[in-house]
Image (cartoon, rainbow, N blue to C red):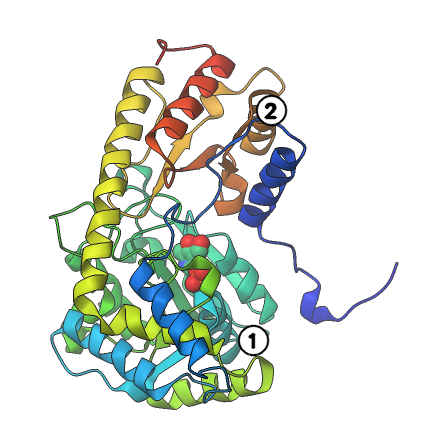
Amino acid sequence: AMSFSANIEKLKPSATIKVSTLAKSLVAEGRDIVNLGAGEPDFDTPLFIADAAVNGVRSGQTRYTPPAGLPELRQAIADHLGARAGREINWKGVVVSAGVKQALFNTFFSLCGPGDEVLVAAPYWTTYPDLVMLARAEPVTVFGAESNSFKVVPSDLEGVVSEKTKGLVLNTPCNPTGAIYTLEELRELSVWAKGRGVWIVSDEIYRNIYFGAQGDTAPGILNLPEDDVGKFILVDGASKSYAMTGWRVGFSYSGVEIAQKFTALQSQITSNTATPSQVAALEAFRNVEAASSAIAEMGVAFRRRRDLVIALMDRLLPGVPYIQPEGAFYLYFRVDGLFEVDENDATTWCSRLLQEHGVALVPGAAFGDDRWVRLSFAASDALIEEAFTRIVVMVGTGAAV
Ligand code: PLP
């Protein structure tokens, strides 16, 4: 066998992308597939954003920008964060990246290496452990109580923290569970991390997709009293809030010194995020009025679909455990009670569901527990209903839709 570097010894392709790729290839073969595997809004990018990019390209905004992004975009993001935080945010702490994925790569690659450990709250978004391993550090997964939507609390962390612990990854609203940490829950974790000298990596990419009070966003690390917060990196971006997954715009906000390291790293790897994408994101972050109304409009659809999937679960799959989604656009439910004889994991169950019934879901193996599956409700009501009809046909319980 060919031998490669230890850098990529544990590297594997993203599990969620694998499912969408398989679903897309079945569609290309002419199969009738309901794809609830994808992790992206089904809306088009709002036109005011797309138009800004087109106009930017036509007027020559097609050259390199500084590697950390257009200064006016960094300032617009700082203003956006400042409005959330209720205090001034230093734009020099903002680094624009090719999606939150690159911001997270910058983070783990810069903060940890061989011999270090990073605590990853589980179930986790599939990419965190893999990025930690790319930095040749060890991900340590830690589950909270299922009865608490798997949210971790300091006593869970006390059980796994060690001398080697460098960071703690939190994701709220959470992919795959849709759980949200309350401000007080976040505060307790933040105080714990500060006391332990551990970095918090706070992924708030789903912050605007929130089913609490209408118009509100989920609590985030910038909402905490500053005294309760130690070292942290906040990552967020345009992908989910503004239906801009393909544009590849994310950012990190951190102390200026580490932001300069991220900038140097990007200057050696990718240079700036694509300039037209930055121009689009600038409009999204700067045109607060148009952006808020786009977010609100998509929010109404997500909220209606959230209510729909819960109603369908309760009616058609009574007794099947699921986590109540309070944000994001995923329903995480437990399928080990639905396994056939000799079926031992959700990967096999999902593959049977896809091959025989044409519904793509993501098996929990991608999130740290292969008794569960993730259903994305970023799809039309009709597709969601069709998926449930097919699931019921397969598992043979419940009433007809
Ligand atoms: N973080 C979480 C929790 C996600 O679910 C995703 C995308 O699925 C990302 C980050 C990556 O987003 P981006 O498109 O900005 O790279």
In the rendered view, tell whether residue 236 sits above or below residue 325: below
In the rendered view, tell whether residue 320 sits above or below residue 307: above
**Tag 1, which secondary structure?**
loop
Determine whether, in the image, residue 14 is placed left or right of residue 299: right
Determine whether, in the image, residue 77 is placed left or right of residue 267: left
Q: Which amino acid does label 2 sit on?
A: Arg
Determine whether, in the image, residue 167 is placed left or right of residue 1: left
Q: Name the residue: 40% across, 75% down.
A: 278
The quadrant of the image that shows the C terminus is top left
The CA distance from mark 2 to mark 1 is 39 Å
Q: Position of residue 342 (x, y in %)?
A: 63, 19
The residue carrying pointer 2 sits among few (fewer than 14), some (14 to 19) or many (20 or more) residues within 10 Å by Cα, namely: some
Disc marking residue 283 = none
Disc marking residue 113 = 1
Q: Which amino acid does label 1 sit on?
A: Gly
**Residue named by callout 2:** 352
Q: Position of residue 134 (x, y in %)?
A: 60, 68
Residue lying at the far right of the rendered structure: 1
The residue carrying pointer 1 sits among few (fewer than 14), some (14 to 19) or many (20 or more) residues within 10 Å by Cα, namely: some
Q: Name the one closer to the observer, 365 or 290.
A: 290
Q: Name the residue: 21% across, 43% down.
A: 300
Ligand 1 neighbours mark 2 (CB distance < 8 Å): no
In the rendered view, tell whether residue 365 sits above or below residue 193: above
**Tag 2, which secondary structure?**
helix
